[in-house]
Amino acid sequence: MLCLVTNAYSISIKAFCPKVFYNFLNSNVIYQKMENKQKKEQTVNLRSETETWLLKNAALINKSGIDRRARIPEGTIQKFIKHKQKINDKRIKSIHRIILNLCIKRII
């Protein structure tokens, strides 16, 4: 008899094969940790790209215009550039999308 993801199934595996059940749970935890690490690395890359672009092109861009277009609170970019205030991840993603839409992401 084969049951998929039920309490009875997990209890029976624990009762008969505790080592197999532990390895199964452990492999899922490791896989989830790897996925979380990859997401964090992607966020870090987005953050570093966006922040360096904003700092390098601060004199050229309309900061309040990007704020409005990205639908983030007024002055977010200005506070980042002037006072080094950290921008949260959700706002970084929307700013990054605006930069890509402007087609001037790689100006150095």
Image (cartoon, grey):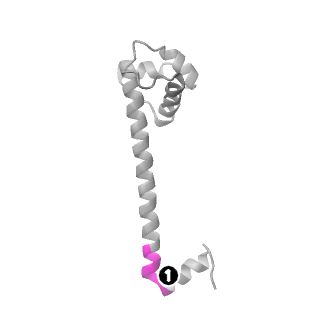
Q: Residues within 10 Å of mark 1 (few under 14, many from 20)?
A: some
21 in the magenta segment: yes
Q: Which residue is mark 1?
A: 14
For the N terminus, give its image quadrant.
Answer: bottom right
Q: Residue at x 43, y 75 (%)?
A: 22
Q: Residue at x 48, y 30 (%)?
A: 96
Residue 72 vs 35, above or below: the answer is above
Task: Identify which residue, 14 or 51, lies in the foreground.
Answer: 51
Residue 6 vs 45, above or below: the answer is below
Please report the bounds of the magenta region as a residue range: 16-23
Q: Residue at x 47, y 32 (%)?
A: 92
Q: Position of residue 23 (x, y in %)?
A: 42, 74
Residue 85 showing in the rendered view: no
In the rendered image, which quarter is residue 108 located in?
top left
Residue 5 vs 74, above or below: the answer is below
Report the amino acid beneath label 1: Lys
Q: Position of residue 4 (x, y in %)?
A: 62, 75
Q: Residue at x 52, y 82 (%)?
A: 13
